[in-house]
């Protein structure tokens, strides 16, 4: 017997659901109606609706604790954004999507998503994500497949993964799953490690470089000080903060973002990334 749907309602202020779900940090969400999205929290398929002053979540066997942790609706956003540098670019990024939150996602799903993100647009990453679910995931409800675990993917061949349009990323994902199966890296143990050590552990996985490791640390482990630098962000930092620099080394750029954007640099990065990517590409 299938359990009935339950509903959770949470009053919120300043929560931009559309920007949060469409800002390149999660790839399991689809707009299904005005202000309503369908997607997943862990292995639970849910719908979420942005009301006038609340969020309404519907699904089977909902856990308020798990839903609140994922959507981070209890976060004091003003305290976080209050630590951002006060400069024209940061002010514009904040004004563009003032209620954007950083989600708290499943570590393995986040690792897999960002291994698959190399040289891909967001729409393509979502297509790969869906293909992996539909081909290898367990059907938890009719038509709804959970994201396949690393245990499941460790038994999948590279060729099978290539059929999900992963290309060269198939080898990386297959090897990363097998490394986890062999106990070479523990995603659970990373939770308690200092950030620098956690990054080193993640980078032991095939296909995980510094950028992917930082994305995982930010979006799965809540290390809000971590500032991932991808092509979009690097271009923006160079244009907005070093417009006259003839030569800006990667080392100098990374030192700058690590120091300038403060203790919640990951949040600052996400605001800048979303603004740059969706407001014309040059941040102006």
Image (cartoon, rainbow, N blue to C red):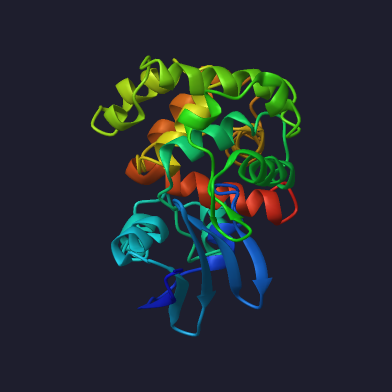
**Is there any visible trace of residue 229 in the rendered image?**
no
Using the image, determine if residue 5 lies above or below residue 219.
below
In the image as oriented, which residue stretches furthest toward the front? Answer: 1
Residue visible at 66% across and 31% down in the picture: 244
**In the rendering, at what x and y percent does residue 4 appear?**
44, 75
**In the rendering, at what x and y percent does residue 265 appear?**
41, 42
In the image as oriented, which residue stretches furthest toward the bottom? Answer: 52
**In the rendering, at what x and y percent does residue 69 appear?**
34, 57
Which quadrant would the N terminus be assigned to in this image? bottom left
Kindly indicate the quadrant of the structure image that contains residue 118.
top right
Relative placement, left or right, of 9 versus 52 is left
**In the rendering, at what x and y percent does residue 73 appear?**
37, 65
In the image as oriented, which residue stretches furthest toward the left? Answer: 192
Using the image, determine if residue 112 lies above or below residue 61.
above
Kindly indicate the quadrant of the structure image that contains residue 124.
top right
**Is there any visible trace of residue 212 in the rendered image?**
yes
Residue visible at 36% across and 43% down in the picture: 224
Residue visible at 31% across and 28% down in the picture: 190
Relative placement, left or right, of 36 versus 194 is right
Nearer to us in this view, 246 or 13: 13
What number of labels is visible?
Answer: 0
Using the image, determine if residue 181 lies above or below residue 228.
above
Relative placement, left or right, of 119 versus 230 is right
Nearer to us in this view, 258 or 105: 105
Residue visible at 25% across and 27% down in the picture: 193
């Amino acid at each position: 017997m299938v359990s009935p749907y339950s509903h959770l309602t949470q009053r919120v202020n300043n929560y931009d659901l559309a920007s949060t779900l469409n800002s390149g940090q999660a790839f399991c969400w689809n707009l299904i109606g005005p202000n309503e999205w369908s997607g997943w929290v862990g292995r639970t398929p849910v719908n979420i609706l942005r009301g006038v002053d609340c969020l309404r979540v519907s699904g089977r066997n909902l856990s308020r604790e798990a839903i609140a942790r994922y959507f981070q609706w209890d976060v004091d956003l003003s305290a976080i954004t209050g630590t951002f540098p006060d400069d024209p670019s940061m002010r514009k990024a904040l004004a563009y999507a003032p209620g954007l939150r950083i989600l708290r996602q499943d570590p393995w799903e986040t690792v897999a998503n960002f291994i698959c993100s190399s040289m891909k647009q967001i729409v393509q990453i979502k297509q790969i994500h869906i293909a992996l679910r539909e081909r290898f995931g367990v059907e938890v409800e009719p038509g709804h497949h959970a994201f396949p675990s690393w245990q499941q993917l460790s038994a999948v061949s590279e060729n099978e993964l290539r059929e999900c349009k992963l290309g060269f990323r198939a080898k990386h994902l297959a090897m990363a799953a097998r490394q986890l199966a062999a106990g070479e890296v523990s995603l659970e143990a990373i939770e308690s490690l200092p950030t620098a050590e956690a990054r080193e552990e993640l980078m032991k996985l095939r296909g995980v470089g510094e950028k992917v490791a930082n994305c995982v640390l930010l979006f799965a482990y809540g290390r809000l000080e971590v500032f991932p630098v991808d092509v979009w962000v690097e271009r923006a930092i160079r244009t907005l903060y070093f417009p006259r620099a003839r030569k800006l080394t990667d080392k100098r750029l990374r030192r700058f973002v690590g120091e300038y954007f403060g203790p919640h640099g990951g949040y600052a990065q996400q605001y800048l990334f979303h603004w740059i990517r969706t407001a014309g590409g040059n941040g102006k």
